[in-house]
Amino acid sequence: MAAPGRGASRPGWAARIAAGRIAADGVTLGAHGAINSLHEPTARAGRAMTMLLAYVGLFVWSFLAATVLPLSSEVALALLIRERGSVPLPIVVATAGNFLGSCTTYWLGRRAALALARRPPARGEERAGRLLRRWGGPALLLSWVPVVGDALVALAGATALPFGQFALWTICGKALRYLVVAWVVARGGT
């Protein structure tokens, strides 16, 4: 007889133990001989927490990589894609983190330009400003390139490039870069 509150079709613990389907370590054999843990909900929660931490780590690493810190977010992205076997979500997370890191550099460039506006611009600053004015927003497709990208982003802020243009071209450049990395990893590259 089933315990109160349980359906008659599901035997209680005692019947399952008597049938020999529960081992001493809490592992049961399922319908086709598959091993099921009695602690499956706990294991599932642990896997979910690990996955969440991996995505948070990718976001933070990608954010920091878009600042002046010499970090590379491609490795973190490749590891997560290889570990999880999923491509779209890691690309979105890495792109979002990298873009928001670039927004920080853009804002710092804008603030620095306001603070330095009292002095005449140096020759290199004038040249870089002309370059960005000449190519405009599309130059930010290269915002992911180490060192050069940071300078382009800061310069976009310093020259007061409209934020909408900055966002459009920066997101496109960073997302395209991550798509290429994901494609290489998914095809078995390193």
Image (cartoon, rainbow, N blue to C red):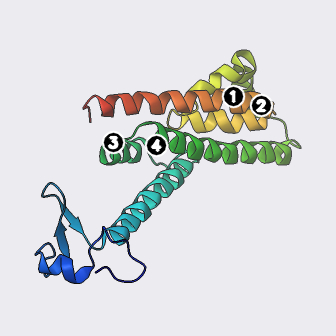
Dot placed on the residue nearer the N-terminal end, 3 or 4: 3
Residue at the image point whose x is 41% and y is 43% from the top: 77
Q: Which amino acid, mark 3?
A: Gly
* Residue in the image at 38% along x and 41% along y: 86
Which secondary structure lies at badge 1? helix
Q: In the structure shown, which secondary structural element does the residue marked by tag 2 occupy?
A: helix
Q: Earlier in the sequence, mark 2 or mark 3?
A: 3
Q: CA distance from mark 2 to mark 1?
A: 6 Å
* Secondary structure under the numbered disc 3 in the rendered image: loop
Task: Give the farthest residue toward the right.
Answer: 118
Quadrant in which residue 8 is drawn: bottom left
Question: What is the crowding at mark 4: few (fewer than 14 residues within 10 Å), some, or many (at least 20)?
Answer: many
Residue furthest front as drawn: 1
Tell which of 87 and 142 is nearer to you.
87
**Which residue is at 79% across, 42% downward?**
110
**Circle 1 is placed at which residue position?**
168
Tag 2 near tag 1, CB within 8 Å: yes
Cα–Cα span, label 3 and label 4: 10 Å
For marks 1 and 3, give the CA distance. Answer: 28 Å
Cα gap from disc 4 to disc 2, whole angstroms: 24 Å
Look at label 1 and name its amino acid. Answer: Leu
The residue carrying mark 3 is 85
Amino acid at circle 4? Pro
The image quarter containing residue 15 is bottom left
